[in-house]
Image (cartoon, grey):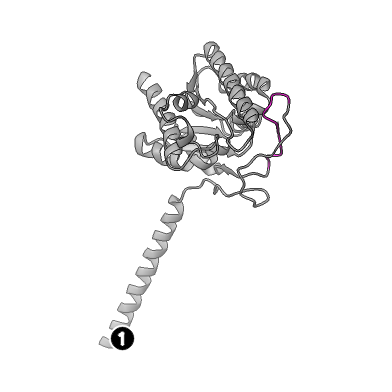
Amino acid sequence: MSAVRAFFGSLAAIIVTLVVLALLGGLLVALEPRTTDADTTADGTGSYAVPTVGPGLYGSGTLGPWQNLIRRISSEDQIRDVLAFDGIFLFGDSIAVQDSSGLERLLADRTGDSIAFHDWSGQPTSAAVDALAEWSRDYGLPRRIVMAVGTNDIFDPPAFAAQVERAMKIAGPNRTVYWVNVYAGRTKQPAAVRDADLANSAWINQQLDEAALNHPNLRIIGWSDFLASRPSGPAPYLRDGVHTTNPLGGNARNQLIVDALQDSAAKR
């Protein structure tokens, strides 16, 4: 009888152990970040690069197809969780694709805020604002929205201002929009193209500054200003004249975003 009791005691212990392991496994799955992996692409190439054609009208070239490039987009569950906890929406391009995981961690450490992403390499501002409109329609919007787009508008700078106005209209006057200004000077391009990139970046940033004069709820995050103020120049922070180096450039850009979010919170 003692042997039988010992057998059933061991069996019960095994069952309890398996149940505990199953519960822990379920908890880990539930806690796992639900943002789609940054390697997700329509064609599996995992590319950040945007093909450009010719000099274009403004010297930087013409934006090529970007829809199959690498992207990072939050799941519906994560979007709804962020809204429920008064978090942040971010709409970005390839710089945000590579840096947003670090931004997510920095926000959690510094402010405890949650964030949902719609980051897509190569997308111009018009596509990001389309996504903003879609999320507004499907889910609603939080009080704070970060727009980290505009770099791909160097190929058509005059189209940018209208997209900023679209974004501000969608956000409405009672939400704060934080817009990261742009710096592009592609180091692998000929000098004339790099000069055009820089001129077109300045043109885009000027349009952002002008929009901020008309929209008190538009805050400019000065990424371009930060790079211009560095004693060593932008090179240590940019691996190709556009995308951030890891970790220095990515950390610096994310720090600027979080500082802006905290600064606005402190003034409320």
Q: Relative to 127, is 243 on the left or the right?
A: left
> Label 1: few (<14), some or many (≥20) within 10 Å?
few
Residue 158 x/y as whole percent: 67, 20
Q: Residue at x 41, y 35 (%)?
A: 113
Q: What is the x, y in percent for residue 268?
A: 38, 19
Magenta extent: 57-67
- Disc 1 residue type (three-letter): Val
Find disc 1 in the rendering and name its residue: 4
Residue 221's spot in the image, x, y percent?
Answer: 47, 24
Q: Quadrant of residue 110?
A: top left
- Above-or-below relation of 33 to 200: below
Residue shown at the point (55%, 47%) measured from the top left: 38
User: Can residue 228 be seen?
Assistant: yes
Toward the top, the furthest residue is 214
The front one of 267 and 70 is 70
Observer-nearest residue: 85 or 218?
218
Picture coordinates of residue 68 (x, y %)? Answer: 67, 44
Q: How many discs appear?
A: 1
Magenta stretch contains residue 30: no
